[in-house]
Amino acid sequence: MNEEIEILELDEDKKKRFSFKLNKFTVLVILLDFFVAFGLVVINNDEFKDFWIPTAMTTMSHKYLAYTLYKEDTVNKVMSENYIEQNTEKINLDDIVIGDTKEKSHYSSKYEKDLYTRMENNEVYKIIRIEENKYKGYLTVIYDPSDVELAVSSKLGKAGQSVNTLVKNNNGLVGINGGGFEDLDGWGNGSIPYGAIIKNGQHIWQHDGGSGGLIGFTKEHKMYLTNKSPADAIKEGMIDAVEFGPNLIVNGKVSKIHGDGGWGTAPRSVIAQRKDGIVLFLIIEGRLPGYSTGATMNDVIDILLRYKAYNAANLDGGASSTMSVEGKLWNKPSAGESYGGRTVSNAWIVTNKQNKPAQAPLKKK
């Protein structure tokens, strides 16, 4: 009789343990069901689609991420609804009147004061920190447009060089990356630039794959945006240029952005000029969770309009977006920070041709 009681007690104990295990399994299943359901809701959310698909499709090596979650028809539909209707006006160079950019006694806005107020002992450029809820970056103000020039890799066709190296090799002070290049599977080293390159009034490079038009400067140091051939652009006075885009502002008029423009949210590099000749280099950091996700084209345009950019064009972005200041990598690129940023084909740099006082900022903000 005692043996039977003992066996029954053991059976009850086993039942309790089994019941406990069953309860844990049930909880796990419920949690998995919740995450699957949540994932389906997110994936089918239109805002998430409009963020995820263009962001993936504008990368060189991660387009597969769009097709991992969505069918080809869905990807094509989203991309057809997110695009940029560029301002196709012929740029009016007469509108750019290079004049007095000294500090003023009165300013019309906070942004105008930020722009004109110099850093200590620096008449060449100023670095302004850009901080918004979702992204961070830097705006370089170059007071004399004659200090801006294009630097090209000395190993063009074989290898690129970091923006830091391009700045140092050309006696520059500040630089940002320029045009795009072959980047198969994300392993491109900047050796083969896409499109055309004009340097010192010479058409020095041409390769298939260029997107957009020519972005550069004339011998009068006016920013020139054109879809003409390199030969015709040179005849019209263009001395330095890369091929990229899209143009964001032309003659003070903004290109129309449908959705997010089809360019998603990403690190950005942009070059612009105001009517008074001041040149702006804009770098937006991105793809860094918890720090800066990146910016859309609309975000970039909003920043440029605050500082009254009159003409502006998008440069190569993503992991290539890098800024060098006085020999140091200044921004946080999404890749390659440990070795000074990705190697690229070319960069827009700031020199100091007239030996104006120029002191680098002591620390980043």
Image: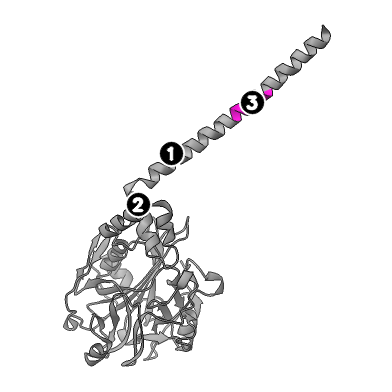
Residue position for label 1: 37
Mark earlier in primary sequence (2, 1): 1
Q: Report the disc number at residue 20.
A: 3
Residues 174 and 203: in front is: 203
Q: Position of residue 191 (x, y in %)?
A: 46, 82
* Cβ atoms under marks 2 and 3 closer than 8 Å: no
Residue 15 in view: yes
Secondary structure of the residue carrying numbered label 3: helix
272 relative to 266, above or below: below
The residue that appears at 35% across and 77% down in the rendered structure is 209
Is residue 265 shown to the viewer in this render? no
Snapshot quadrant of residue 207? bottom left
**Residue picked out by circle 2:** 49
Q: In the image, which residues are magenta?
A: 17-24
Label 1 environment density (alpha carbons within 10 Å; few <14, some 14–19, many ≥20): few
Specify the farthest residue to the right: 2
Disc 2 + disc 1, Cβ < 8 Å: no
User: CA gap, disc 2 to disc 3?
Assistant: 41 Å
Tag count in the figure? 3
Residue 117, position as x, y percentages in the image? 33, 73
Q: Residue at x 26, y 57 (%)?
A: 81
Residue 22 part of the magenta segment: yes
Three-letter code, disc 3 = Phe
Q: Is residue 148 left or right of residue 153?
A: left
Q: Earlier in the sequence, mark 1 or mark 3?
A: 3
